[in-house]
Image (spheres, rainbow, N blue to C red):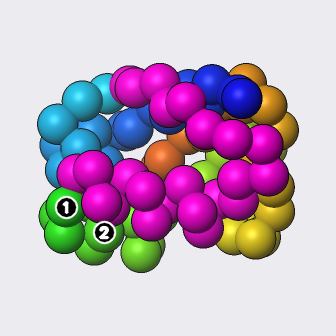
């Protein structure tokens, strides 16, 4: 069993209703699995944000949603930022 730390920024934090949470999960969880679980927990507003977000896993940009997450990883959800 692993515990992931999920940090939400900007619109993702608003949609999730929190800036950070911890998730107990079994080994072998992928980023796609995590996203599905987060949508089930937080609803459609977060689904819309996740669809356009970037993800960092332990500080590294991850584009492969089928990559297994390491145990005790930190996952950052970064929606597109407005402005310049």
Residue occupying the point 50% across, 31% down: 23
Quick check: marks 1 and 2 in contact, CB under 8 Å? yes
Residue occupying the point 60% across, 53% down: 55
Using residue 70 as the reference point, say whether residue 50 is left or right of it.
left
Q: Position of residue 20 (x, y in %)?
A: 38, 25
Q: Nearer the viewer, residue 80 or 2?
A: 2
Q: Position of residue 68 (x, y in %)?
A: 81, 55
Using residue 64 as the reference point, say whether residue 4 is left or right of it.
left
Is 37 magenta? The answer is yes
Q: Quadrant of the N terminus?
A: top right
Is 33 magenta? The answer is yes
Visible residue check, residue 32? yes
Please give the range of residues in magenta: 20-42
Please tell me whether residue 82 is drawn above or below residue 18 in the rendered image: below
Q: Nearer the viewer, mark 1 or mark 2?
A: 1
Residue count near mark 1 (Cα–Cα under 10 Å), binned few <14, some 14–19, many ≥20: some
Residue pointed to by mark 2: 47
Residue pointed to by mark 1: 43
């Amino acid at each position: 069993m692993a515990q992931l730390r999920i940090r939400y920024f900007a619109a993702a934090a608003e949609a999730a209703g929190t800036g950070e949470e911890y998730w107990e999960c079994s080994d072998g969880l992928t980023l796609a699995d995590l996203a599905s679980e987060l949508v089930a927990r937080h609803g459609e507003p977060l689904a819309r944000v996740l669809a356009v977000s970037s993800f960092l896993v332990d500080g590294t940009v991850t584009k492969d949603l089928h990559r297994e997450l390491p145990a005790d990883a930190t996952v950052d959800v970064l929606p597109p930022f407005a402005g310049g």
